[in-house]
Amino acid sequence: MSQTKKATAVAPSNIAFVKYWGARDLERVVPENPSVSMTLSTCVSRCTVEHLPGETGEHEIRWRPGTGAGLETPPPAFSERIRAHLDRLRDHFDCGGRFRLATENSFPAAAGLASSASGFSAVTLAVTGALGREVDGAERSDLARRSGSGSASRSVFGGYVRWPGDGLTGHTGDDSTCPAVQILPASHWNLRDVIALVESGPKEVSSLDGHRRARTSRHFEARLTHLPRRFDAVCRALEARDFEAFGREVEAEAIELHTIAMTSEPPIYYWKPATVAVLEAVRHLRRAGMPAWSTMDAGANVHVICEPESEDAVAERLAEVPGVVQVIRDGVGDGPKTFTDPASDEHLF
Ligand code: DP6
């Protein structure tokens, strides 16, 4: 087997400031609204893929719990989703054969830390690398999106990323593409993400079900009406590095996502008592003059966004909140990396 048939990709998770919640076309992963996120650097998925060109049969998929994992077995439906994505990529590249794949996370999977975003971005990049294909950013992003994890389309870029990259019109056809685009590099603003982990197991309701139910909330239409203004405000604040304007919108946005979830039919309650305690601790920090703002994805954990000078104090405070099991320090990063060094991940197989 030639050495170029194997590659390893390390792809980070991302935290959305304006969230993807609800889809125009869930099957084709076309969102109702544009989202904008920051790609992280510490919370990553590492995936090695080997292409076996002459072979037929099932792909081999290995899951490694990884250093920070809370799951000893893959999240529900994980293997089926990976398998389907490998089939999709094989069709796209028309390469035949089958794949051996091993993947692990540096953080707890399926607990609202966007493990699908990093995971599917890593799988997409590792397959592309193993096949030795030249693929531009837009195609990589679009391929990652087709995994079914819309947020994965953002994780193929570093820094600050919007998805879709252009407007939302014309994205519902059979052959539609809908890639993300980097709007600002990581070097633009060193924002930190101090994550208060209050649960490390899988969440009860997947984002997929959340997207499905979003329209059943009577607040959803109102959200769509004012979201363009919020999206612009967040992008402008990022551009201007205006932390106060940025934080105010981002925290309100996260509360709104959870309001939609809690008022969906049937309702989705992601918060735990410790979630509320962390939100309160962050408000107290602000009152005490420490600029920090909260955001949450579809889970109970809270991402506290701050600037580097506040990071130590924020992390210390969050660790004291009852119910916080771990504090993870992360921040904006440069995006994924792909290696074709044959020895880079022997241990995974
Ligand atoms: C709340 O459909 O991308 O994180 O496949 O579980 O990663 P996963 O979810 P996806 O929805 C993401 C929902 C969100 C908001 C966001 O990241 O934009």
Image (spheres, grey):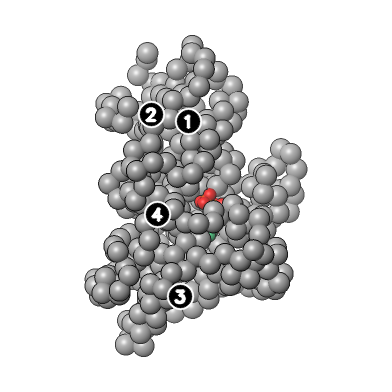
Q: Is residue 319 left or right of residue 298?
A: left
Give the image location of residue 146, x and y in percent.
Answer: 59, 41
- Residue under pointer 4: 201
Q: State the residue in front, 203 or 327.
A: 203
Is the distance from the Cβ of mark 3 to the nearest ligand 1 atom less than 8 Å? no
Mark 3 vs mark 4: which is more N-terminal?
4
User: Which mark is on residue 247?
Assistant: 3
Q: Bin the neighbour count of mark 3 within 10 Å (Cα to Cα): few under 14, some 14-19, many 20 and up.
A: many
Q: Which of labels 1 and 4 is toward the front? A: 4
Residue type, mark 1 in image: Thr
Secondary structure of the residue carrying tag 2 is strand
- Contact between labelled residues 2 and 3, with CB atoms less than 8 Å apart: no
Q: CA distance from mark 3 to mark 2?
A: 39 Å
Q: CA distance from mark 2 to mark 1?
A: 8 Å
98 w.r.t. 114: above or below: above
Residue at 38% across, 61% down: 199
Give the image location of residue 97, x and y in percent.
Answer: 51, 17
Q: Is residue 260 left or right of residue 160?
A: right
- Residue under pointer 2: 7
Residue at 43% across, 56% down: 111
Residue type, mark 2 in image: Ala
Mark 3 vs mark 2: which is more N-terminal?
2
Mark 1 vs mark 3: which is more N-terminal?
1
Mark 2 vs mark 4: which is more N-terminal?
2
Mark 1 vs mark 4: which is more N-terminal?
1
Is the distance from the Cβ of mark 1 to the nearest ligand 1 atom less than 8 Å? no
Q: State the residue in front, 27 or 337.
A: 27
Give the image location of residue 287, x and y in percent.
Answer: 36, 88
Q: CA distance from mark 1 to mark 3?
A: 37 Å
